[in-house]
Amino acid sequence: MQVESAEFLVSAGRPDQFPWGAWPEVAFAGRSNVGKSSMINRLLGRRQLAHVSATPGRTRTINFYRVNDAFLFVDLPGYGYAKVSRAVQEAWWRLVETYLTQRPQLRGVIHIVDARHPPTPLDRDLEAFLAAVGVPSLVVLTKADKVGRGDQGAVQRRAAETLSLPSADALLFFSAETGEGVVALWRAIEEQLRTPAGVAGRAGGRSSRRPRGQSA
């Protein structure tokens, strides 16, 4: 993918602040501080387009970025930061749940998991939620530069088993530091963008499957 233009569009704290338009969207989801913003910056070849915070739980809005005036990247608030109050976590989740279940422009989700650690129960809950509401997702194991090449197969298998995925081969490795996985991830994103409108979220409505007691 040749990125010719990339710009911040809007930061939405309420559904009525989501941008209008027919651009297809790919969303990025994962735990607080897992590297969503760093991944977006690396993919777009921009150093600071998506703000990278050293403080977990800082992002409380859904941030939209327009790419090549053709599609949007959507940075969802991170989940799992224990020092954030339950009320704040629930508010985040309501916002994200509305986006994931009612946004017709959404084509798929890049679900980011830290390759250095086993997926958490919240990671598992999010993957189950996405499956329950019919949103296509791709699990990407980030911080790949911290995992030895000889260990990557075992890390893939562990993540696939924990997340109840049918195959470990579909999981991608990615490093914002070295650029590992950029080309493969762009191919996967382009495939998601080709998903016909209305396929994401085809299960419709809300689901009782949701990350327990946290935002996502």
Image: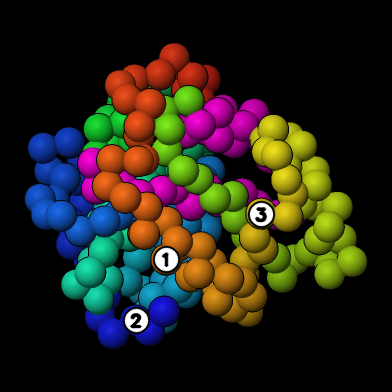
Q: Amino acid at mark 1?
A: Glu
- Is residue 83 visible in the rendered structure shown here? no
Q: Badge 1 is on which residue?
A: 190
Tell me where residue 80 appears, x and y as whole percent: 53, 35
Position in image of residue 49 (x %, y %): 32, 71
The numbered mark, 1 or 2, whose residue comes first in the sequence reads: 2
Task: Using the image as rendered, state which of residue 13 and residue 73 is in the foreground.
Answer: 73
**Residue 3: assigned label:** 2
Amino acid found under the numbered disc labelled 3: Ala
* Disc 1 crowd, CA 10 A, few/some/many (<14, 14-19, 20+): few
Up/down of 94 relative to 175, above or below: above
Q: Is residue 18 above or below residue 144?
A: above
Q: Which labelled disc corresponds to residue 170?
A: 3
User: What range of the chain is rendered magenta?
Assistant: 104-131
Residue reaching furthest to the right: 150
Q: Say if residue 191 shows up in the picture.
A: yes
The residue lying toward the viewer, choosing from 51 and 42, is: 42
Q: Residue at x 10, y 50 (%)?
A: 20
Q: Earlier in the sequence, mark 3 or mark 2?
A: 2
Quarter of the rendering occupied by the N terminus: bottom left
